[in-house]
Amino acid sequence: MTNIKENLDKINRQILETAKACDRSSDAVKLIAVSKRKSVQKIKDAIEAGAGHFGENYIQEAVEKIDIIADESITWHFIGHLQSNKAKFAVKYFEYIHTVDNVKLAKEINKQAKKNNKIQKIMLQINIGEELTKSGARVENAIDLVKQIHGFENLSIEGLMCMPPFFDDPEEARSYFRQLVQIKEKIMDENFDTVSMCHLSMGMSSDFKVAIEEGSTMVRVGTSIFGSRD
């Protein structure tokens, strides 16, 4: 518990200092504690230490943990690859789905959200580094994807998400974050209705400070809070 609280306090302090240094407000950036493969007890420790947003990657694992924790004050973010046949669970359990990257998935999420009488908040995942091992829409297809799904009545497109290639030097990720900002601006220039583009989900343990400097509103941090992967 002590380490999680110390780590969480340290990350929150770094987020605050980084935001302040680039003239952003103290509440401009949400910290999402990435709790995949972490125990219910560790998540409860993080909640007690003040964490309010958690990110999960695997539907079955997440559903089990969310049911046990049963804390309605917590905001859950789905940040892993989502298959269409699991969309009903993502809609039921998560306020945000960060990883929508194709029309088929968006259509199924919209269908399930309608069944649940819910407007599902989603972000479009962009494969910013064009890596074969990562999911996400291609950069050049981003605007077309928005054109195809922005009219879905039970979806609210809140912004974009990316995972740039890993670098030992976080400065090398900066150009990828800037590119995501440029995509966001191009989408905003199209003036789509139901598309707010208020969020950029970018930055992880190794590079979140650079991401914040480039405009991130959600940073996804796991290792620096919970320690190395279980």
Image: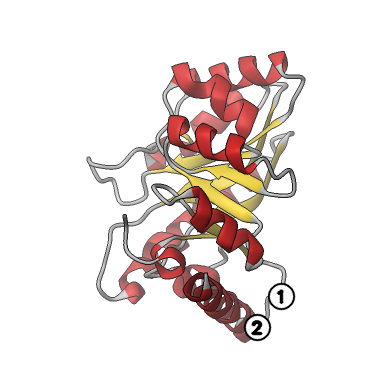
The answer to which quarter of the image holds residue 136 is top left
Q: Residue at x 54, y 47 (%)?
A: 160
Q: Position of residue 141 (x, y in %)?
A: 42, 34
- Disc nearer the start of the sequence (1/2): 2
Q: Is residue 146 left or right of residue 56?
A: right
Q: Is residue 2 above or below residue 223?
A: below
Q: Residue at x 23, y 42 (%)?
A: 133
Q: Dot 2, how many residues are within 10 Å of its Cα: few (below 14), some (14-19), or many (20+)?
A: some
Q: Is residue 36 left or right of residue 25?
A: left
Residue 67 - label: none
Nearer to me, 126 or 57: 57
Task: Let me know if residue 201 appears in the view.
Answer: no
Q: Position of residue 151 (x, y in %)?
A: 68, 23
Q: Amino acid at mark 2?
A: Lys
The answer to which quarter of the image holds residue 13 is bottom right
Q: Position of residue 102 (x, y in %)?
A: 45, 26
Q: Amino acid at mark 1?
A: Ser
Whether label 1 touches label 2, CB < 8 Å:
yes
Task: Let me know if residue 2 appears in the view.
Answer: yes
Q: Dot 1, how many residues are within 10 Å of its Cα: few (below 14), some (14-19), or many (20+)?
A: few
Residue 20 - label: 2
Instruction: Name the residue furthest right.
Output: 117
**In which quadrant will I find the C terminus?**
bottom left
Nearer to me, 42 or 198: 42
Q: Is residue 199 left or right of residue 180?
A: right
Q: Is residue 102 above or below residue 43?
A: above
Q: How many marks?
A: 2
Mark 1–mark 2 distance (CA, rounded to whole Å): 7 Å
Q: Is residue 53 left or right of residue 164?
A: right
Q: Residue at x 57, y 32 (%)?
A: 146
Residue 26 - label: 1
Q: Residue at x 45, y 50 (%)?
A: 39
